[in-house]
């Protein structure tokens, strides 16, 4: 995650999703043969075993305490459901002193040009103060060298998907080839170098409502796809409720060229070569708490960003700071969990 984030967040009502789920029967079809072969098909315990449980505190000034696998297991912070889905949770002890236990999963295997990563989620954290993310960053280079790609990232009760890219100097995002909206106004919002954009890089917000967080919790979920190609970086989101998931994703024969424009696209014409800017990327799932995004926008009214209810998290919770609320209201953090159906990783053949 980037060291400082001042993007706009969203606020919405936290609603617990049902553990049962009916997959939609019809999907948008594509016909071209896939150039990808599956490398990993991860669900259930295979997903858990693919990752290492990182430990630590003070992630982006947040108050999450990331714990080991053994402590996570004893604290019921992860589990596998009867349908083989994966639950990643946050501690729900009512009152804690300075940190709240959470998870940060990192992959030992790394990825880069030629890889396609598809994440199918039924639910994502839905509570003020949470800062969940599924992202990639270099395991071998010093940030931002080696690149960072945030595929799923939002705070609190946000409902609209966002994605962002961070690189060393020399990469910028164009104005065509994608359907999303630039998150920062002006030309600086297209500069992917965080050293020149107050640590933000280039971020894009999807034009699809109810495409992350609270927005997918009761509507069937969403699937996110990241393609890292020599031609550029692409991110798509497909909502179950809108019957958007391509049939070739369901059949595990993905053909990204048939999916339409992504909502984020970083072209190699503006960032060349892609293989130099994105190297040895490890996968990360984490749920931070407060910090330089969820904490910094705690008192902001973010109606312009598609929040579900009016008022800031400060207004909705009655707490003047994110930290006060998170430390004193563990019962609300039963809603701060991921429910992941699968993570499928492909390589181009």
Image: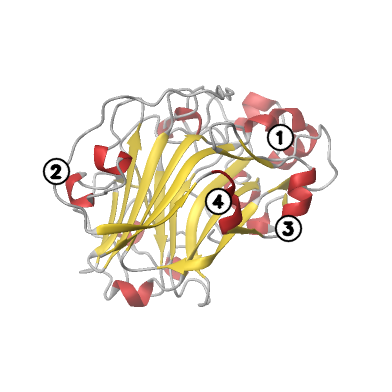
State the CA–CA distance, disc 2 to disc 1: 53 Å
Horizontal side of 46 relative to 149 (left or right) equals right
> x, y (%) of residue 150?
45, 54
* Label 2 – label 4 distance at C-alpha: 30 Å
Question: What is the C-alpha distance between the residues marked 1 and 4?
Answer: 42 Å
Q: Quadrant of residue 40?
A: bottom left
Disc 4 crowd rating (10 Å Cα; few below 14, some 14-19, many 20+) is some
C-alpha distance separating marks 1 and 3 = 23 Å
Q: Residue furthest left?
A: 32
Compared to residue 306, the image places residue 51 above or below, namely below
Dot 3: what SS?
A: loop
User: Could you say which quadrant of the image residue 212 lies in?
Assistant: top left
Q: Of the numbered discs in the image, which one, if any, rests on residue 31?
A: 2
Numbered disc in front, either 2 or 1? 2
Task: Indicate left or right for 95 with 77 as reference.
Answer: right
Q: Earlier in the sequence, mark 2 or mark 4?
A: 2
Q: From the image, tell me which residue sits under label 3.
A: 57
- Residue 105 lies left or right of residue 267; in this view the side is right
Q: Say which residue label 1 marks.
A: 320
Label drawn at residue 160? none
Q: Residue at x 39, y 26 (%)?
A: 23
Q: Which mark is residue 46?
A: 4
């Amino acid at each position: 995650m980037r060291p400082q984030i001042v993007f706009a967040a969203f606020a919405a009502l936290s609603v617990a999703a049902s553990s049962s789920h009916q997959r939609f029967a019809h999907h948008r079809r594509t016909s071209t043969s896939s150039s990808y072969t599956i490398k990993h098909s991860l669900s259930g315990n295979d997903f858990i075993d693919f990752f290492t449980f990182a430990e630590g505190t003070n992630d982006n000034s947040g108050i999450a305490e990331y714990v080991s696998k053994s402590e996570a297991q004893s604290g019921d912070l992860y589990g596998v459901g009867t349908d083989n889905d994966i639950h990643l949770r946050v501690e729900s002890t009512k009152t804690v002193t300075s940190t709240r236990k959470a998870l940060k999963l990192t992959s030992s295997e790394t990825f880069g040009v030629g890889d396609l990563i598809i994440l199918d989620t039924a639910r994502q954290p839905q509570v003020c103060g949470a800062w969940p993310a599924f992202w990639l960053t270099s395991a071998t280079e010093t940030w931002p060298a080696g690149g960072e790609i945030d595929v799923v990232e939002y705070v609190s009760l946000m409902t609209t998907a966002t994605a962002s890219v961070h690189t060393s100097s020399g990469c910028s995002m164009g104005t065509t080839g994608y359907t999303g909206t630039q998150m920062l106004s002006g030309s600086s919002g297209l500069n992917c170098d965080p050293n020149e954009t107050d640590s933000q890089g280039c971020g894009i917000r999807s034009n699809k409502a109810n495409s992350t967080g609270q927005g997918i919790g009761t509507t069937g979920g969403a699937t996110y796809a990241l393609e890292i190609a020599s031609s550029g970086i692409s991110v798509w989101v497909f909502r179950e409720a809108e019957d958007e998931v391509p049939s070739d994703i369901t059949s595990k024969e993905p053909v990204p060229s048939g999916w339409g424009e992504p909502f984020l696209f970083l072209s190699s014409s503006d960032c060349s070569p892609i293989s130099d800017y994105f190297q040895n990327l490890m996968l990360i799932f984490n749920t931070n708490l407060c910090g330089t995004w969820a904490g910094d926008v705690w008192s902001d009214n973010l109606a312009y960003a598609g929040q579900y209810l009016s008022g800031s998290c400060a207004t909705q919770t009655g707490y003047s700071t994110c930290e006060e609320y998170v430390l004193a209201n563990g019962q609300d953090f039963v809603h701060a969990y991921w429910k992941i159906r699968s993570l499928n990783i492909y390589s181009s053949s």
